[in-house]
Image: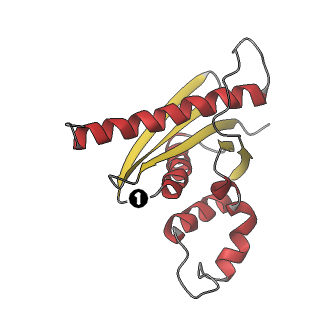
Amino acid sequence: MNTPEIRIFTDGSCNPAYNIGAWAAILLYDNEKIQLTGETPDTTHQRMELLAVIKSIEFIDEKFDKVSLAIFTDSQYVVRITDRKDKLMKNKFITKKGALLHNSDLIEVLIRQIETHTIEFIKVKAHQKPVPDEKTGLEINAINYNIEVDKLARNRLRDIVNKSHPYL
């Protein structure tokens, strides 16, 4: 029996002027589409990209058993963690200069998730033009969902900024 696959599209957004960020994910399973969003104060864009993936996997852990994950992201930073994980863990998340690696807390969580799940990370080009839905193919759908998840994250961030600073 094949392990069911969930496709996840993630993105993060940050407003450095107000020091807040938002993340979003779209999960596709069977014919179901689940949207997740969240927000965080005192953050960076890279942390939002990481949180989008981490929170998606946490959600899946609560709802599903034994699934494989295809995670689509436009973040090279996130995609490269798989290649760098052994070196990062060996060096205990310390840089060559002796400082703690930025985002080491979230990177460590993601590495644990990578080691306990079947995950394939797929890099999607950011900000591509949408392709009509009547066409089929993973790449075309990936572009459309990447655009949609980007809008989800940016809209969530815009809502937070407007709530926090209603006179803007």
Question: Is 22 situated left or right of 112 in this image?
Answer: left
Foreground pick, 93 / 44? 44
Numbered marks: total: 1
Name, please, the residue furthest toward the top. Answer: 134
Foreground pick, 85 / 68? 85
Query: How would you rate the neighbour count of disc 1 (Cα within 10 Å): few for under 14, some for 14-19, many for 20 or more?
Result: some
Residue 58: percent from left, percent from top = 51, 50
Q: Residue at x 60, y 87 (%)?
A: 97
Q: Residue at x 62, y 64 (%)?
A: 111
Q: Quadrant of the C terminus?
A: top left
Q: Residue at x 72, y 45 (%)?
A: 123
Residue 25: percent from left, percent from top = 53, 38
User: In this rendering, does residue 64 appear at all?
Assistant: yes
- Dot 1 corresponds to which residue? 43
Instruction: Label 1, secondary structure: give it.
Output: loop
User: In this rendering, does residue 67 appear at all?
Assistant: no
Residue 129: percent from left, percent from top = 67, 26
Q: Amino acid at mark 1?
A: Thr
Q: Quadrant of the N terminus?
A: top right
Name, please, the residue furthest toward the bottom. Answer: 98
Question: Is 147 situated left or right of 152 in this image?
Answer: right
**Residue 26: quarter of image:** top right
**Residue 162: quarter of image:** top left
Residue 108: percent from left, percent from top = 56, 68
Q: Residue at x 59, y 78 (%)?
A: 93
